[in-house]
Image (cartoon, grey):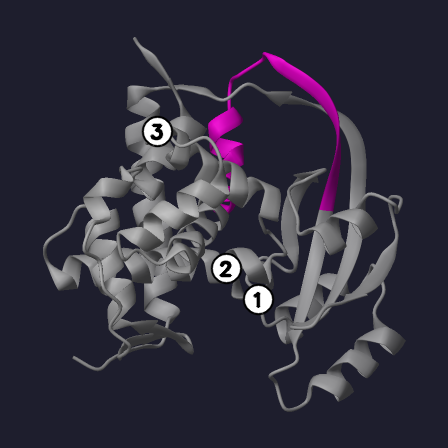
Amino acid sequence: MKKVSFIFIFVLTVLGFVKAENLEGYQLFDKIVLVVNGEPVLKSDVEFAKEWYKIKDDKQAQEKIIDSILLSQQARKLGISVSPKEVDNALLSIAKANNIQDLETFKKELEKNGISYTKLKEFITRDLVSNKFLHFYLRDYITKGIVEGSVEDVKKIRMIYISKDRPDYESVVKLLKEKLNKNNFSEYAAKYSDDKFTAENAGLLGEVKKGDLAEELDKEVFSRKEGDIFQVDTKEGTYFIYIEKEEKKLIPKENLTEKDMEKLKREYDMYLKKLREKAVIQRFE
């Protein structure tokens, strides 16, 4: 059976690469039409999404945006991010598909056609983060039964995320600083973590390799050893991380059959359904 690359398929599917001229005549409309877990979506976002995903219906475009936001929000809670370089490389790929060899020229061409470069960059960033999270979430399934790959350092970690938005932020952080240890980490994660994904799994994030997490978390995790429990403060909140295990492990190549891709799509749909059930989505149209 023909094999296809998981990452390549998902990037194309999620990002839906299109040529710049297909967005010609695009205009901005500043009006909030949706709020997804506190994150507003403007009319301009919907209009852009219709062109970006080649959709004519407003509602379908809104659903695409909701899915992308929910996945990117979950990724941020888990410390998964993309670097500015990754975003620039994705933008440059689109530019080169339109015979433009640098981002500055690409930006000028977009603006000449009434297209917001900032809006495009925002969509690219969010979709890349979503894709990276999907890859992380489905990794165990992806690598099952595959034996080819490279040996890398892998760390199994548990995580507690405390958001600065919660009213008892300071008292909870103080409590965890004083009480947290490897014996009660799972219990406290289930009780206090503001990240539902890890809270529901007793803090377990799973196995990570270098580059999986946001830079500030990645640096700390891979400078620590097995058994360490430590705190990482960010502008959004505080992470408490426990390195439960570390080892050298084979990271397989990710070639999947078309049948595997169908199963992954079902897994993806089920996960999105769970996120939507827990989300607060307000519609203003």
In which quadrant of the rendered view does residue 179 lie?
bottom right
Say what amino acid the circle numbered 1 marks: Asp
In which quadrant of the rendered view does residue 239 lie?
bottom right
Magenta-drawn stretch contains 137: yes
Bounds of the magenta span? 132-156
Q: Residues within 10 Å of mark 3 (few under 14, many from 20)?
A: some
**Rendered image: mark on residue 195:** 1
Q: Give the structural element (helix, strand or loop) at label 2.
A: helix
**Residue 247 in the image: x percent, y percent?**
80, 31
The answer to whether 52 appears left or right of 222 in the picture is left
Say what amino acid the circle numbered 2 marks: Gln
Which quadrant: the C terminus? bottom left
Sequence-wise, the earlier of marks 2 and 3 is: 2
**Residue 71 in the image: x percent, y percent?**
43, 56
Say what amino acid the circle numbered 3 marks: Ala
Do the CB atoms of the residues marked 1 and 2 lie less than 8 Å apart? no
**Residue 56 in the image: x percent, y percent?**
10, 54
**Rendered image: mark on residue 74:** 2
At x 34%, y 42%, the residue is 14
- Residue with the mark numbered 3: 97
The answer to whether 195 appears left or right of 90 in the picture is right
Sequence-wise, the earlier of marks 3 and 1 is: 3
**Residue 191 in the image: x percent, y percent?**
64, 74
In this orientation, which residue lies closer to the viewer: 16 or 134? 16
